[in-house]
Image: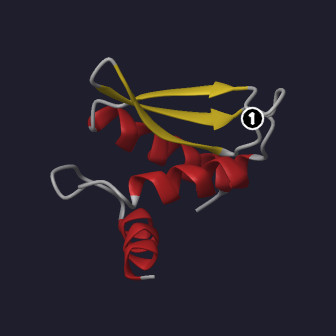
Amino acid sequence: MKDDQLLEKLEEAARRLSIQLGYEDLRKGDVNTPGGIFLLKGEKRILIHKGLSTREKADVLTRVLSTLDTEGIHLPEAIRKRLERLQES
């Protein structure tokens, strides 16, 4: 699966989990993170640094989604395997 297709499927998975996803400049001032998940007013949100490559964005989103329960949504087998690999490590 190409990087742009992978990122698109991961973004779709976040939407299906009702998690708002955004891309921002997360490397300003004292902040220096590729991204992550957080709670804002009781809602889960994912922010990813917009300056990352498509592959890096997909890696961050895969890492975040691997910490969540995705059993209730359909995911392509390739993505399911990526998530499971991270869950096992």
Quarter holding the N terminus?
bottom right
User: Label 1 crowding class (10 Å Cα cut-off): few <14, some 14-19, many 20+?
Assistant: few
Residue topped by disc 1: 31
Residue 44, above or below 66? above
Between 52 and 73, the residue placed more toward the observer is 52
Between 18 and 67, the residue placed more toward the observer is 67
Residue 59 location, quadrant = bottom right
Measuring 40% from the left and 74% from the top, which residue is drawn there?
Answer: 81
Residue 3 location, quadrant = bottom right
Quarter holding the C terminus?
bottom left
What color scheme is it? Answer: secondary structure
Q: Is residue 35 left or right of residue 15?
A: right
Q: Is residue 70 left or right of residue 78?
A: left
Residue 78: horizontal and vertical position, in percent?
Answer: 44, 69
Residue 25 location, quadrant = top right
Residue 28: horizontal and vertical position, in percent?
Answer: 82, 27
Measuring 30% from the left and 54% from the top, which residue is drawn there?
Answer: 68
Residue 72: horizontal and vertical position, in percent?
Answer: 15, 51
